[in-house]
Amino acid sequence: MNASAGNGVPKIRVRGLHKAFGQNQVLRGLDLDVGVGESVVVIGGSGIGKSVLLKCILGLLVPESGSIEVDGKDVMGATGEARDQALRKFGMLFQSAALFDSLSVWENVAFGLVQGQGMTRADSKEIAMEKLVDVGLGAEVAELSPSELSVGMRKRVGLARAIATEPEIIFFDEPTTGLDPIMGDVIDDLIVKCVRQLGATALSITHDMASARKISDRIAMLYGGKIVWIGPTGDIDTTDNPFVDQFIHGRAEGPITLQTRAL
Amino acid sequence: MPILQPIGRTMLAFMTATGRLSIFTAISVSHCFRPPLYPRLILRQMVEIGFYSLPVVGLTAIFTGMVLALQSYTGFARFSAESAIPNVVIVSITRELGPVLAGLMVAGRVGAAMAAEIGTMRVTEQIDALDTLATNPFKYLVAPRLIAGVTMMPLLVLVADTIGVFGGYLVSTAKLGFNPATYIQNTIDFMEFQDVFSGVVKAAVFGFIITLMGCYNGYTSKGGAQGVGMATTNAVVSASILILSSNYLITELFFAR
């Protein structure tokens, strides 16, 4: 895979991103490149702005300054049709899956097809069923309501919804948080499989190192509003970066101090 | 200037809130007129607001009509003016009590439910999910509710008017010794188009206020369960206050001479 992202235009290019909430400066000039077909995982402690990064790229939050390019096109501050067009390239698996509880499981999976692409319900149902099989769920769950599912099942449905429109870029927001280690591993396997199948570019955030190692080509460490280390997944254990060292070994002592305020 | 500071801060907060609400309203209304609309969602909200509010609005209306007849009788009997009861009932119900009481009841029932539903969608990231699936939350969540509120409230109030007048009729004929035929004849004679029409206009405005407040407070809620609870309270309280104050303004517009 294209680990260095040096050749050609990166799929996602973030430069000098600043985002604050009131007095709380969360991102302070963050730079990040994600190459085409590459899977980058951003690690970092809870509440230091990992989700904020994803939300800025998706345009759910508007950063104060910096630039965000997707396929070389500036998407920051895009509205209306331009933003819709940019969003069609994306799929996202939310931390709590964020399934629509007023809709059945298959309607959730088919949502992007019906609303975004104008597909008929019958056609979209067929694709939704295929995607549910892809994530290891059978037809028996299709008519259930999301509230009837376990957390792990919901993540699977969320994954099916994220890949249903066959997006070029998929975001994973803490895909294994709240799952037992075995279910976490199952989800990781599914993520790797689905991303490969689609040939998609993936950007994930997590603080679960097992998950990060498994699904990434490169790992970036976010601290203090910037990427303090980025490198191939294999290098994470050999780097002498004190932030990474402290984080992956889970030590209380080190250069990383605890964030007290939630975002 | 420690005295001026809190005043300034309060003023600024108030201005910010007013500005936010104005922008939210403008965006929401503009989405009601721009395709694509979602007929299925509009229909579902119409059923939710119009049909499922019928019992509570009907009960409110019938007891209000009954009490109105009873109280007017006590008052008017002193002047031997009992015959004015059909007049009082039809005018009060169609002009004021029908729309205002229905509005307040629907604000409690529907406004709260909307704020809670949309607020939960906000804190569980479902609104963000809508957005990332290239679906505008204003178009998908807010516009159908506004359209349903503005169209269903007038119908609901017409039903409330009818039931309210029937409540007055029940008490007057069964308890106060009115002749049923005369009572109905008097009611019809005293019924003015403008009274009913003003009530219907009020209902449409109230429907807009209720759904807007429900959507706005839900949409802007944050901070988990507590935030959703607060959004629900704010939706009902702000809708009720706006209903009562706009009621005065509309009355002034229609009937001030």
Image (cartoon, coloured by chain):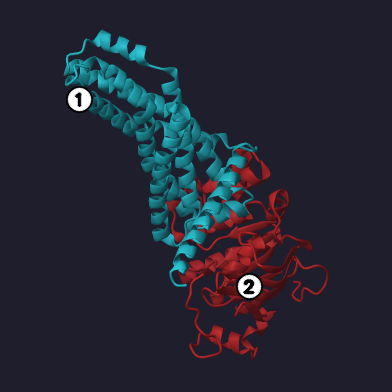
Question: Any idea which chain is the cyan one in this picture?
Answer: B
Q: Nearer the viewer, residue A113 or A131?
A: A113
According to the image, label 1 marks what residue? Answer: B75
Give the SS element for disc 1: helix
Q: Nearer the viewer, residue B155 or A84?
A: B155
Q: Nearer the viewer, residue A252 or B119?
A: B119
The image position of residue A228, as x and y in percent, is: 65, 82
The amino acid marked with disc number 1 is: Gly
According to the image, label 2 marks what residue? Answer: A41
Give the SS element for disc 2: strand
A242 up-or-down from A192: above or below: below
Residue at 52% across / 39% down in the picture?
A: B146
Question: Any idea which chain is the red one in this picture?
Answer: A
The amino acid marked with disc number 2 is: Val
B217 up-or-down from A219: above or below: above
A256 up-or-down from B241: above or below: below
